Every structure is written in structure tokens, then in C-alpha cells.
């Protein structure tokens, strides 16, 4: 196909057909700048103002956090671990190739299972976007946390996030508009005895085209006490829940502070930090 014909063909395609779901995911779901800032602050608070050097991003996907990490300091190294070879290839092409040569040398992507992967010791392990909820059994979650504990340096922290509240158990769709698309979060199924949970991420476009199930997650909806108990059970010395601060109107400020009780909101997102 010559270039003119190719251009005409691309023009006729619906927006959904031309979309890159990984780029859409990064724009709508991830905020690696905020994650990086939070990691640095919390690590310094725990370890007398010191800053971490080596990050392991589990379930790294597009490995955006790894890339942001090495750009933040010339001595920083990052390891991304994911079982999906295809998304790691995407990360290599679209994210790692944008780094300069020295930054690129400080990122390693590993196509392995986070349950069993062995890497060099790191200062920080991050498993964000509720990715560890893929483990449905307590024994699996325990094995994962134990492997993470073994992979941390003596002054090491593990960072997780979680969400909950009564809204989390509802079958529902939530739409968020962005400039060129609408992000759709679909809680499709919840079963209370096993806490089995199915969710989809979809995208809708101004021309009416859609990707209703760009990503599908078969999770267990873990509660904060369960997560905390398993972390302590495998040997983490301390587990802290960071709750989002609210302004005078009850809106979240984006600032997360240590909390022992939280508030009974219909929907909340927290960070969980486990200290080796």
C-alpha cells in the first residue's frame, strides 16, 4: 500500500480502530509523577531523610514508572517485572526508547512471574493500580509478599494501593471525560462469598466508536485488614495506611497522610506502605 492510499485508509478508520489502548491507559489511569513524589517523601520520612536509588516495579506493564524513576536522578536504577511479553515489548518501543542512552542503561525489563522472580536487592518495590489483586488465595498473596520481602534491601519499603467503600461492591459504570476520549470504568461482577471481582476498562470516542473491554481484570476484592495481616505475617515490621486528606468541602486534596482509622466513605483509595 503506497503512502497516499495508506493515509486515506487511516482517515476512514474509526477512532477506536486507530487507538492505542496502552497510551490511553497511561493517560487515564496512571499518574507516575505523583507516585514518584509519594515514594520519595515516604521513604525519606522512614529513613532519616535518605532517598531510594533502586526501584522494582511489579506488574510493570508499560513500565512508565521505571522510566520516570531513572529520569529523576542519574544514580537511579529501575527493574520492571511483568508476565506479559507483549506489553513489555510495547514499553521498550514507546517508553524506553524515549530515554537517553545513559537512562536506558539503568532500566531492566524482566519477563517473569512476580511470584517467583529473583532480582538484585532493591530499595523500593511498587505494585500499583491494584495489580496484586490478581491473587485470589491468601496463600498466593502470602507467597507474593514473602518474595517481595526477600527482594528488598535492609532499608526497604513496599508500596501498594487499594480501594474500597460501599461503591466498590456495586455493579456499575463510571465515565470520566478526557480531551479526546472518555474513560469508562465498569465494575461488572462481584460475588460476596469468594470476593471474586470482574472489572473492565473501556474507552469511548467523539465519533461514536468504542472499545468496551480494552482491559479486563479478574480480581479478588481484598480488604485493608486482610492485606495488612498478610504483610505482617510474612515478616514486614510495620504497615502504614496512607489516607487522602480532604479539604473543607470534603474533596480529596491529593495529599496522603498516615491514618489508623480512616473514614467510612462510599469510595476511597489508599496507599499501603510496608517496611522491611
Image: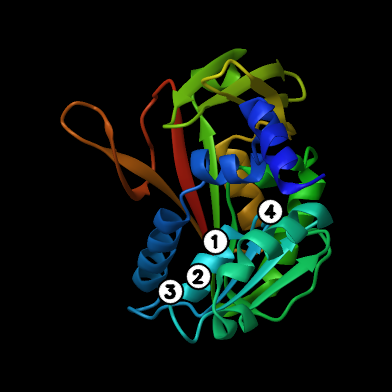
Mark 1 vs mark 2, CA separation in Å: 6 Å
What's the CA distance linking mark 2 and mark 3? 5 Å
Tell me whether the residue at label 1 lies in contact with that at label 2, contact meaning CB atoms closer than 8 angstroms.
yes
Residue tagged by mark 3?
Answer: 72
Q: Residue at x 15, y 30 (%)?
A: 248
Up/down of 117 relative to 3, above or below: below
User: Looking at this view, is 232 or 243 the one in front?
Assistant: 243
Identify residue for label 4.
61
Q: Residue at x 38, y 62 (%)?
A: 37
Q: Is residue 72 left or right of residue 89?
A: left
Spatial CA span between label 4 and label 3 = 20 Å
Whether residue 80 is visible:
yes
Mark closest to the chain's N terminus, 2 or 4: 4
The quadrant of the rendering that contains the C terminus is bottom right
| Alpha carbons under labels 1 and 4: distance apart | 10 Å
The numbered dot on residue 65 is: 1
- Which residue is nearer to you in this view: 157 or 213? 213
Residue at point 47% right, 74% down?
A: 71
Residue 192 image offset from top left, x and y in percent: 71, 18
- The quadrant in which residue 10 appears is top right
How far from the left and from the top, in percent, is residue 175?
A: 49, 20
Amino acid at each position: 500500500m503506497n503512502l497516499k492510499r495508506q493515509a486515506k485508509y487511516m482517515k476512514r478508520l474509526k477512532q477506536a480502530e486507530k487507538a492505542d489502548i496502552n497510551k490511553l491507559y497511561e493517560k487515564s489511569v496512571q499518574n507516575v509523577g505523583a507516585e514518584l513524589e509519594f515514594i520519595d517523601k515516604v521513604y525519606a520520612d522512614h529513613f532519616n531523610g535518605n532517598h531510594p536509588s533502586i526501584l522494582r516495579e511489579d506488574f510493570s506493564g508499560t513500565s512508565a514508572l521505571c522510566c520516570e524513576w531513572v529520569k529523576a536522578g542519574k544514580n537511579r536504577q529501575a527493574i520492571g517485572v511483568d508476565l506479559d511479553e507483549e506489553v513489555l515489548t510495547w514499553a521498550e518501543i514507546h517508553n524506553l526508547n524515549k530515554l537517553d542512552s545513559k537512562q536506558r542503561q539503568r532500566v531492566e525489563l524482566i519477563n517473569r512471574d512476580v511470584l517467583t522472580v529473583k532480582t538484585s536487592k532493591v530499595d523500593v518495590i511498587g505494585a500499583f493500580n491494584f495489580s496484586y489483586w490478581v491473587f485470589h488465595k491468601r496463600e498466593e498473596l502470602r507467597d507474593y509478599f514473602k518474595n517481595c520481602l526477600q527482594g528488598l534491601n535492609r532499608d526497604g519499603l513496599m508500596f501498594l494501593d487499594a480501594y474500597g467503600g460501599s461503591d466498590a461492591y456495586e455493579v456499575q459504570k463510571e465515565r470520566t471525560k478526557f480531551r479526546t476520549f472518555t474513560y469508562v470504568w465498569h465494575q461488572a461482577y462481584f460475588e460476596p462469598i469468594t470476593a471474586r471481582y470482574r472489572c473492565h476498562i473501556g474507552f469511548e470516542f467523539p465519533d461514536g466508536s468504542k472499545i468496551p473491554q480494552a482491559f479486563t481484570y479478574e480480581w479478588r476484592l481484598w480488604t485493608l485488614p486482610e492485606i495488612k495481616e498478610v504483610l505482617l505475617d510474612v515478616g514486614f515490621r510495620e504497615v502504614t495506611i496512607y489516607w487522602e486528606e480532604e479539604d473543607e468541602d470534603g474533596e480529596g486534596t491529593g495529599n496522603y497522610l498516615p491514618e489508623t482509622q480512616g473514614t467510612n466513605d462510599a469510595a476511597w483509595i489508599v496507599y499501603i506502605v510496608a517496611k522491611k
